[in-house]
Amino acid sequence: MAKQDYYATLGVARDASADDLKRAYRKLAMQYHPDRNPGDKPAEARFKEVSEAYDVLKDDQKRGAYDRFGHAAFEQGGGGGGAGMGGFDFSAGGDLGDIFDQMFGMGGRRGGGRTRTGTDLRQGVEIDLAEAFTGSKVTLRVPTRVKCETCEGTGSADKGRAAETCPTCQGAGKVRAQQGFFLIERTCPTCGGQGRVIRNPCRVCQGAGTVQRERSIQVAIPAGVEDGTRIRLSGEGEAGGQGAQNGDLYVHISIRPHEFFQREQANILMRVPLRMTQAALGAEIEVPVIDGTRAKVKIPAGTQTGDQFRLRGKGFSVLRSAARGDMFIQVAVETPQNLTSRQRELLEGFEAEMQTGSKGSPDHEGFFAKVAAFFEGGRS
């Protein structure tokens, strides 16, 4: 029997655009797809014709060859057992191809004959710096897919009856289609690439073997964890369909900034403001430590802004180790404001003393000596 013209099969003009072809194919594929017409052989044959026509016309090179030579362009090497319908193999190893899957976004259901593993999940959790130092346990509420209790994850409404081998691909998960000189392998449209089908799907999960639920999962965060650390919880992701292996849960850690401490790997930096008199005369101050204790720091006379003092072993915990880093105290000398009359009087007297030849501010005196020389033309 002579084949129908491909353009007539899709119901489009010979100058139809790619979008016109796609719209026509989608409409006819939905109408005649075997899933919508179980046991209807004429509908199945019509679907094959539509799929074959679109497979040729959607490709610019194939379409050009068809426009020039008609069906004869694809008959070379296309004969042979079970290769009717323009070279598509619908024998025991294949059925309707995978054009429908590609068109309707089902390409992600590839499995090569294997049941799909559950999807991995990502969950973020925010902790404070003290929790990162000591380690902690947090409880997450994770929306996910879990094993269906009705069918015990098999996806079948028949107790004890698992999925059967797909009759279309014989469990391979793929079918082959021969087009001219080429043999193309595609995902099986019947089982979606899983290689198995369920005859009587569970009414609760619709054959998926999983249902949507919210789970409570406790996560142990180790001491010394850093901002941006990712913790993997094996098997705590979404349940796999039809009894397959669960996916994993990835917990991403973010650490809130602390009002006192700034972490630099295993060390901690703390900026402490000092009164001018404390910096000039020297002092002893008390500072908090990340572990909740206190430490005393001796400030020597003449301390300047930016000077640092090191407290060994008072820093941050180290991941998977009993060691700790160090804590650095960085001081900033604060100039007094809103002086009382008495304070101003004392400072003015102090300034007068400094101007009588005191060497108490060597940086100040050295700088302005160079400035004076500069203005006098004594540049070197």
Image: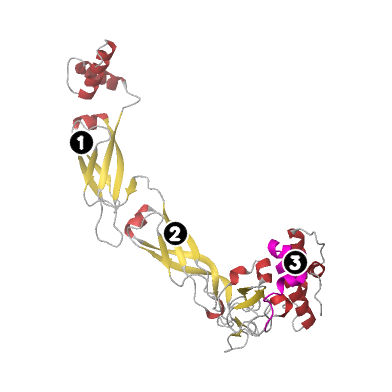
Within the image, what quadrant is residue 98 found in? bottom right
Mark 2 or mark 1, earlier in chain = 2
According to the image, label 1 marks what residue? 283
CA separation, marks 1 and 3? 94 Å
What crowding class fits label 2: few (fewer than 14 Cα within 10 Å), some (14-19), or many (20 or more)? some
Q: Amino acid at mark 1?
A: Ala
Within the image, what quadrant is residue 96 found in? bottom right
Q: Is residue 196 above or below residue 351?
A: below
What SS does tag 3 mark? helix
According to the image, label 3 marks what residue? 66
The residue lying at 46 percent from left, 73 percent from top is: 235
Asked whether 14 or 219 is in front, the reply is 14
Task: Determine if the magenta segment contains residue 340.
Answer: no
Q: Bounds of the magenta span?
A: 53-80
Badges 2 and 1: C-beta atoms under 8 Å apart? Answer: no
Task: Determine if the magenta segment contains residue 58.
Answer: yes
Badges 1 and 3: C-beta atoms under 8 Å apart? Answer: no
Asked whether 89 or 105 is in front, the reply is 89
According to the image, label 2 marks what residue? 252
